[in-house]
Amino acid sequence: MEKNQELAHYQQLVAQLPQLRQEIGKVIVGQQQALNEMLIALLAGGHCLLEGVPGLAKTLMVKTTAEALAMDFKRIQFTPDLMPGDIVGTEILEEDHETGRKFFKFNQGPLFAHVVLADEINRTPPKTQAALLEAMQEGRVTYAGVDYPLPRPFFIIATQNPIEQAGTYPLPEAQLDRFLLYIKLNYPSETEELQVLRSTTGTNRPVLNTVLSDEQILDLQRLTRQVHISDELLGAINRLVRATRPEGTPSDFVKQWCDWGAGPRAGQALVLCAKANAVLHERFAVVPDDIRALAFPVLRHRIALNFKAEAEGITPDRVIEALVKEMKL
């Protein structure tokens, strides 16, 4: 593909992103920030953790997005008795009817889909959580010494409920770091909630049009990595990430409130997400607004607060807000 043709192809794909949001908006009322962040994670080739109280349409948002993207969708309900084989797959004994020879065949689990919803991930034991996170990191599943590649693009959205901790297994901080973004859903506004009541209690069901295919998403992911970011903004991201670490930071409040801060993976995530945000807004270069918009979902699960901060009601978002203000981003 020639350079001019390639540019025209990318421009055509980017021009379809507003249409994608419009299609999802037929079903999902409001939650534009969370929806944008979810699409950013997809464009950046990462995965996201979606947190919100019950009834905020987390499952519906993910399912609707998958339908508008014309990609395979699987939902896994995580429960205390779920085993790794229930999500990854397992071998079954089969018989060749012509030869009578018996053999084991790997039967793929629900993890083998383009979009996977890991519903209530904190309700399953750590060994099952680890099986999912390994697939997120490696992009493949290993069973009985054989590697099985997962579909591409491969996008996991895990959900968790923040208000009920009984019978749950919270994800360790090191495993949280595997998620590109930690997205928080808030209650809708009064107008949006009224619209939800009006649109979901009748007989009308909106028909979604598919906007982008899996191959087109892969093209957009390649485009995202080609988006320009200046050395000045790269330096700002690097300074922001390093400023979250108690050792060596010039910020007194970080030393007072944080046990440890974000690692290099956070910097990589912030660069990629800033690029994806630029693509989502039909730009081919990163601007400071892209960094400000993504600093919170990228960093909030990568900062560990100490007991003093928790006792004072300090949240990771407050630390990030203070750092962004201090660095004049």
Image: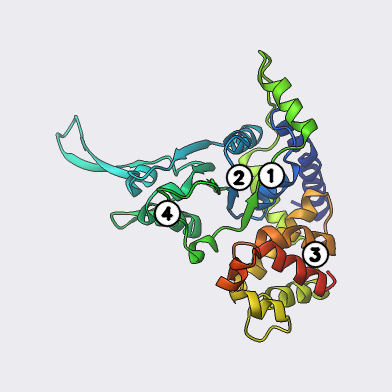
Residue 11: % across, % down: 82, 46
Give the amino acid type for the residue marked by disc 2 in the picture: Gly
Give the amino acid type for the residue marked by disc 4 in the picture: Tyr
Spatial CA distance of label 1 from label 3 is: 32 Å
Taking the spot 76% from the left edge, 41% from the top edge, the residue there is 17
Q: Quadrant of residue 224?
A: bottom right
Badge 1: residue crowd in 10 Å (few <14, some 14–19, many ≥20):
few
Circle nearer the viewer, 3 or 4: 4
Spatial CA distance of label 3 from label 4 is: 40 Å
Residue 306: % across, % down: 57, 72
Q: Which mark is residue 52?
A: 2
Q: Are marks 1 and 4 in contact (CB under 8 Å)?
A: no
Give the amino acid type for the residue marked by disc 1 in the picture: Asn
Q: Are marks 1 and 2 in contact (CB under 8 Å)?
A: yes
Residue 306 visible in rendering: no
On screen, residue 277 versus residue 94, left or right, reads right
On screen, residue 228 versus residue 297, left or right, reads right
Q: How is the image coloured?
A: rainbow
Spatial CA distance of label 1 from label 2 is: 7 Å
**Residue at which label 3 appears:** 228
On screen, residue 291 versus residue 308, left or right, reads right
Q: Depth check: 321 or 84 in front? A: 321
Spatial CA distance of label 2 from label 3 is: 34 Å
Give the amino acid type for the residue marked by disc 3 in the picture: His
Q: Depth check: 190 or 261 in front? A: 190
Q: Quadrant of residue 212?
A: top right
In the orientation shown, which residue stands out farthest toward the front?
A: 311
**Residue at which label 4 appears:** 169
In primary-sequence order, the first of circles 1 and 3 is 1
